[in-house]
Amino acid sequence: MLMQAQEITEAIKNYMQCDAIGLQALVLHGEWGSGKTYYCEKDLKAALKGIDVKTCRVSLFGVSDYDEVLNRVIASCLPLSDKVAHGAGAAISALVKNTIKAGSSILSEKIEDLGIQLTLKPDLLLPLLDMKKVLVIFDDCERSRFAQDDRVFLGFVNNMVENHGWHVLLVRNKPLSFEDESSVEKAIMRQILFEPDLHTLYQGLVKPKLQFPEHIDFDIDDAIIDGIKGSAINVRALSRSIPTINCVLGTSVLVDKTVKSYGRAQALSDFISYAVLASTGNTPKKPDTSNKAVNMIDNSKVIEYENYLLVSKALAPLTEGGKVSPGAIENSFKEFVLAKNPESSADLEAQDIENQWFALPWLEDDQVKLLANQLEIILTEGQYSLTWFYKIIRIALNLIDLGFWNDSFREKLLESLRLAASRDPKCNAAVLRQERAMANDFYGMNADQIMDELISNVEKEESERALNRISLELSDVDGDTGNTLSDLFKEAMQSGYSRTILNVPAEYVAASIYEGTAASQMSLHSFFNRNIKRYSDGQSLTEAVEWLRSIDDRLVKAGSKSRMGQLRTEWIRNDFKEAIEEMDERAQRISADSDTDM
């Protein structure tokens, strides 16, 4: 009979009210590690205490004979009955007088506390025990050679119940068979299949040991319980997985509101399920689809296995009883959340706005204003992904054309797109250009123009980031630094943002030339000879000329490391001279043209 903890407790309470006439034992059985012992020690013990009944839980692990079982029960049941404890009985007086050693070390320790020493067989003490309001729980039945002999052990149980009035609960992994052993029917009154109460298990065993994040926006208790429920319930494995659960609870992605709360909650549940499963030593196995037709393949198992692969490396130590790496868990869980939630909450909101936008001809002014307010919030937060750029541009331009927004929103729109592009890890200038080409004027010229501006801004930011990738500390300069510099300078010139090269200090460039190998010096010679003359930012030509002159001055002071190095340095200085003359002339022409316009 399948029962949950509360129902089992009520059944046992009723059992404790039975008298010795016709009394038999109960069996509580359930999967190994399902929490039977935890239930007996926590829930049942507390519940029976409320009706003035004590529990005497005895593990049979390693027990090999009748006397050892009794020794453990007697040791667990001490102190003895009030009559015996006060030394009033004739039997106890005789025991005190004899003062001889007890046969069991466990029993002797307990009885010596009362000043008593024994060599008598333990069953002679049975009449001295007060067992009227005691439930004797024999746990770990399958781990005892004595208890595995059903005929002998159940005979012992039947004797204790029928002749001494004990109330006995046998805790087993598997039920006893009434068909295979007739002694079962004589000794056992009822067998109950244990099903753990997840909420009770969580509240008592798991929750007190967890460290919860602040400002969580979903029911984290339910998410964790769902995760436990999704694994094979094993209390020992669950206990071992608690440090891993704490690692996950400490990750930033768990409170990242750019991912929908439902998606984060589900990812947490799934991750915990895998962690508990791994703690049992089991993991999802790759489904064998090699000899199956497509329509015969269980896709749910394939998906489950693929999901587990995302976290398998981080959870691998659990399968061998080891400790996980907090860093590995954090990275793995972040990847897991993003993989299961490719759309952010902002994307879902954008989808909702687009769905409403299709109904534009049927909307009233106040409904369109509400829609515009929703879109403005999305623009301000800038958390939507690349796939929504063009759609948001179209809706925003329509709102401007309809007069619900003024032209100033164009700049707000562009700023929002810049912010979203910087936050989307999949977004870069190349991808944006691909989106622009795929749109093929579908969204209109104005939308393409805004996208072009966005691409231009993203390219500039990428160029600046490229220059900042290297440290500008002179101590970091080595023989190959010139190669890196020349590549970065060319990239900046080709992207149309020549001015960014001026962010590299002149002393850094001079040191790179001085320290450079032949290949490094020749790479810089190639750039300054062929590319620098095409410096395109007319507003900073004068600054560029001063930058080149500053590098040249430092080269004169530094000299060269070798004869060939000196030769190559002279070539570069000659490049500077030619570039300075040409760029200075261009700067003067621009200045003259500017004066004419005025």
Image (cartoon, rainbow, N blue to C red):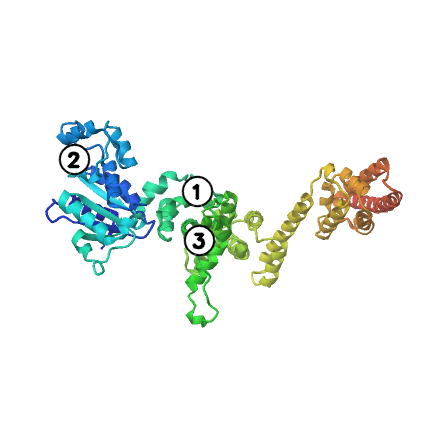
Residue 176 place in picture, x, y as percent: 24, 55
User: What is the distance, in whole Å, between disc 3 and disc 1 at their CAs?
Assistant: 50 Å
Which element is circle 2 on? helix
Residue at position x 34%, y 42% in the image? 205
Question: Residue 370, relative to residue 109: is it above or below?
Answer: below
Residue 317 place in picture, x, y as percent: 48, 48
Q: Which residue is situated farthest in the left direction here? A: 21
Nearer to us in this view, 426 or 98: 98
In-image side of 205 versus 510 (left or right): left
Query: Which badge, 3 or 1, is on the more N-terminal residue?
Result: 1
User: What is the distance, in whole Å, between disc 2 and disc 1 at their CAs?
Assistant: 47 Å
Write down the residue under mark 2: 128
Instruction: Work out whether residue 73 can be spotted.
Output: yes
Total numbered badges shown on the rendered structure:
3
Q: Amino acid at mark 1?
A: Pro
Query: Which badge, 2 or 3, is on the more N-terminal residue?
Result: 2
Write down the residue under mark 3: 368
In-image side of 69 versus 525 (left or right): left
Q: Residues within 10 Å of mark 3 (few under 14, many from 20)?
A: some
In-image side of 403 versus 234 (left or right): right
Write down the residue under mark 1: 243
Q: Are marks 2 and 3 in contact (CB under 8 Å)?
A: no
Q: Residues within 10 Å of mark 2 (few under 14, many from 20)?
A: some
Residue at position x 47%, y 49% in the image? 315
Which element is circle 1 on? helix
Residue at position x 10%, y 47% in the image? 21
Q: Which residue is situated farthest in the bottom direction here? A: 293
Q: Quadrant of the N terminus?
A: bottom left
Front position among marks 2 and 1: 2
Q: Amino acid at mark 3?
A: Val
Q: Quadrant of residue 112?
A: top left
User: What is the distance, in whole Å, between disc 2 and disc 3 at their CAs?
Assistant: 87 Å
